[in-house]
Image (tube, helix red, strand yellow):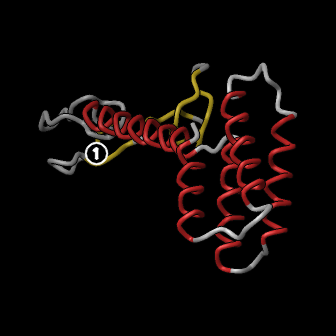
């Protein structure tokens, strides 16, 4: 098949001695050749199914929309904001301290760093209360670590408090 400009319409056709001839397909019922543009077979009357049915198109469109909605919902649900990164960093640091990867002084330094970064957080932002809560919690943990090591129970409580900050 070649694409050829015939009567100012671009159609798929066969070119035979410079003449435009419509593409022929076999009828699915009787097997005779019919035009691909025919709505029904002139020989047996069965509908030409060369195109996709409306029902199939609707199913494909519906499924595509469902997939798009699910993907957008997943992105919105699992999207981490900048403040959630600070929360994750605090939790990771507490876990590292628990297993001995970092000592009390390093944990305090991480908590102090987070607290000071969040003190500079723009107070006009909608999440300013959340930033303040995270900052206060980091400062509190740092202060508690001044005098003593933390127990596993205390670390679990701090992690739970950090996760509860919304």
| Few, some or many residues within 10 Å of mark 1 (<14, 14–19, 20+) | some
Task: Give the left or right position of residue 95, taking residue 45 as reference.
Answer: right
104 vs 5, nearest the viewer: 104
Q: Is residue 16 visible?
A: no
Quarter of the rendering occupied by the C terminus: top right
Tell me: 149 left or right of 151. right
Seen at 72% across and 41% down, the residue is 136
In the displayed orientation, state which residue is furthest to the left: 44
Image height check: is 144 above or below 153? above
Using the image as rendered, state which of residue 7 and residue 66 is in the foreground: 66
Asked if 53 appears above or below 144 in the picture, the reply is above
Outermost residue to the bottom: 100
In the displayed structure, 106 sits above or below 19; it is below
| Residue 112 x, y percent position in the rendering | 84, 52
| Residue 12 drawn at (x, y percent) | 52, 37
* Horizontal and vertical percent position of residue 72: 51, 38
x 66%, y 45%: residue: 84
Q: Residue at x 72, y 64 (%)?
A: 93
In this view, 105 is above or below 101:
above
Say what secondary structure mark 1 lies in.
strand
In the image: residue 108, left or right of residue 49: right
- Quickly name the residue at label 1: 33
């Amino acid at each position: 098949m070649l694409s050829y400009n015939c009567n100012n319409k671009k159609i798929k056709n066969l070119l035979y001695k410079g003449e435009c001839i419509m593409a022929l397909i076999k009828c699915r019922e009787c097997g005779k050749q019919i035009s691909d543009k025919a709505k029904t077979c002139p020989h047996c009357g069965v509908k030409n199914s060369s195109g996709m049915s409306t029902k199939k198109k609707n199913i494909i469109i519906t499924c595509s929309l469902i997939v798009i909605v699910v993907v957008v919902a997943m992105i919105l649900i699992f999207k981490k904001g900048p403040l959630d990164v600070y929360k994750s960093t605090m939790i990771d640091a507490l876990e590292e301290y628990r297993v001995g990867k970092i000592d009390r002084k390093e944990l305090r330094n991480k908590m102090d760093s987070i607290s000071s970064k969040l003190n500079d957080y723009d107070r006009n932002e909608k999440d300013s209360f959340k930033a303040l809560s995270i900052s206060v919690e980091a400062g509190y943990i740092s202060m508690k670590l001044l005098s003593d090591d933390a127990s596993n129970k205390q670390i679990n409580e701090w992690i739970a408090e950090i996760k509860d900050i919304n």
